[in-house]
Image: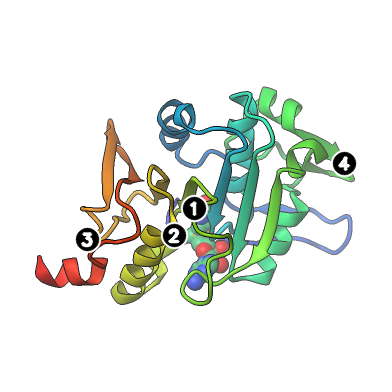
Amino acid sequence: MPSSHAREAGPAGGSGPGGPLVVHGRFFQDPAQFDLLVGRCLPGLDDPVVVWVAGCANGQEAYSVAMALAAAGRQGFRILATDVSPEALARTGSGRYGARRPRGLTALDAERYLRFRDGAWEVADALRAHVETLHHDLAAGPMPLPAGTCQVVFCREVLTGMTVDQQVSVLDRLIRWLPVGGWLFLGGAETERGGASVFQTVEVGDRRVYRAVRPALHVPARAQRSAG
Ligand SMILES: C[S@@+](CC[C@H](N)C(=O)[O-])C[C@H]1O[C@@H](n2cnc3c(N)ncnc32)[C@H](O)[C@@H]1O
């Protein structure tokens, strides 16, 4: 997703209750990442899988993950969708995506996971029940879940808005917090910035996902960066 997404994010063209609703962004923004999630990550994870979508914007990414897990037959999974923006959290929580079939969804997906209500497509309750929203600043404060309890993190196109030092700090905290074997998805132009010895890069085609391979005791990413 281009970084302009953050500027565009949000319902636009609304004209009050009942007015037209257009929500930017798309479901399954990077389909190859979802293939990686289902094909490489999920087979090694026991139920219930917990996924953190950091910087959830309008919610399509979180609900796409939920759809992928549901389609894979996973049981009891939980998606934590966080953002620093209260407006983004409200949009994610509403799960409403306008009168046209949301971008990135097939007619079958829409039929299976959404419903059309009060003039807009919205996420069906059964899927929404797996997705919880929480205000959280990735660059500050404690992590939103206890260490080791979440196996997969999507943090796409959030780091791009930060300084390099902030990115290193966020990634270092993520490294310490993810369980060994946990997975980290970043945006297409984002990298794990020096965490190479604690992340294994799994590449499939031109896509990559990072796997935590070392326990919490490690050389901080910042030190590795200056050493390298
Ligand atoms: C470009 S959007 C990415 C949306 C989504 N991850 C995706 O790829 O579809 C960036 C989102 O990150 C959020 N964000 C920016 N800085 C953040 C921070 N420090 N902590 C949490 N969320 C942040 C913005 O509010 C915005 O919703």
Dot 1: few (<14), some (14–19), or many (≥20) neighbours within 10 Å? few
Reading the chain from its start, which is encountered first: label 3 or label 2?
Answer: 2
**Distance Cα–Cα, label 2 vs label 4:** 40 Å
Q: Are marks 2 and 1 in contact (CB under 8 Å)?
A: yes
Label 3 CB sits under 8 Å from any ligand 1 atom? no
Is label 1 or label 3 in front? 1
Element marked by disc 3? loop
169 lies above or below 14: below
Q: Position of residue 196 (x, y in %)?
A: 22, 53
Element marked by disc 1? loop
Give the residue type at disc 4.
Answer: Arg
Q: Is 20 on the left-hand or right-hand side of 26?
A: right
Give the residue type at disc 3.
Answer: Gly
Q: Which residue is mark 3?
A: 194
Q: Which disc is residue 177 wearing?
A: 2
Q: Position of residue 26 (x, y in %)?
A: 57, 44
Give the residue type at disc 2.
Answer: Trp
Dot 2: few (<14), some (14–19), or many (≥20) neighbours within 10 Å? many
Dot 4: few (<14), some (14–19), or many (≥20) neighbours within 10 Å? few
The answer to which quarter of the image holds residue 47 is top right
Q: Which disc is residue 148 wearing?
A: 1
**Distance Cα–Cα, label 4 vs label 1:** 38 Å
Q: Nearer the viewer, residue 182 or 134?
A: 182
- The reply to whether residue 123 is visible in this rendering is yes
